Amino acid sequence: MLPITIVCAILLLKTGQNTKIKGDAAIAMISVGALAFGYLLMNIFSTSSNLSGDVCSTLFGSTSILTLKKEEVWLCAVLSIVVVLFFIFFYNKIFDVTFDENFARSVGTKVDLYNLIIAIIIAVIIVLAMNLVGSLLISALIIFPALSAMRCFNSFKSVTICSAVISVICALSGIVISILAGTPVGSTIVAVDVVVFFICYIAGKIVGGSRA
């Protein structure tokens, strides 16, 4: 799954730079095509009798945190450390490329290289969380913490740190709630993310209004 996701991320990066195929269209093409081919392969090379259950787990993640294998947990831990270390050591380059590509090019930053590395890192993150929340909910797991942090902070560093903290808190809270309530872990985590987003949205409105 990891190499295929990395290839798709690179394809999205390259097609996004192509004026003939816009970013949204490229995402739709690759995501829908990948789902279609994935379902075909699961039917042709089925390894279990419960195909509908396998499809549901692929789309919406594991129904329980206990279904994850020990090897998957260790892989998540190692790759998570690698991602965090890369972000720490190359923070300035990532900031330049993310904030203003033209400025980054003017100061000699290898924009294409760092865009490629960022795309690969995002692909790794998607694969890490896919078994837990599924392929359909993974985008919410990536987007909501950042949107929540942006409701409360304005600087790049503050938003980055806050979104990372919110991600961890929401993930842990979702796992605990799913264990206690017996709900699907992926959906529960995303639901917690949604609730936190609305809390941050209201808090941002209150703080913004008081400052005005």
Image (cartoon, grey):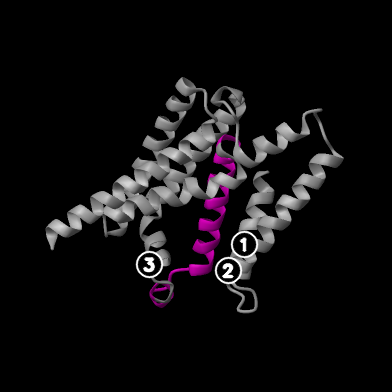
Instruction: Give the image location of residue 175, x and y in percent.
Output: 46, 28
Residue at the spot x=73%, y=57% of the render? 33
| Relative height, residue 43 to residue 66 (above, below) | below
Q: Amino acid at mark 2?
A: Gly
Quadrant where the image shows the N terminus: top right
Pointer 2 with pointer 3, Cβ within 8 A = no
Can I make out residue 40 in this image?
Answer: yes
Instruction: Give the image location of residue 58, x and y in percent.
Output: 66, 39
Pointer 1 with pointer 3, Cβ within 8 A = no
Q: Which one is in front, 166 or 155?
A: 166
Q: Which residue is mark 2?
A: 23
Pointer 2 with pointer 1, Cβ within 8 A = yes
Q: Residues within 10 Å of mark 3 (few under 14, many from 20)?
A: few
Q: Amino acid at mark 1?
A: Ile
Q: Which residue is mark 1?
A: 27
| Relative height, residue 14 to residue 201 (above, below) | below
Q: Which one is in front, 43 or 81?
A: 43
Q: Residues within 10 Å of mark 2 (few under 14, many from 20)?
A: some
* Range of residues picked out in magenta: 103-132
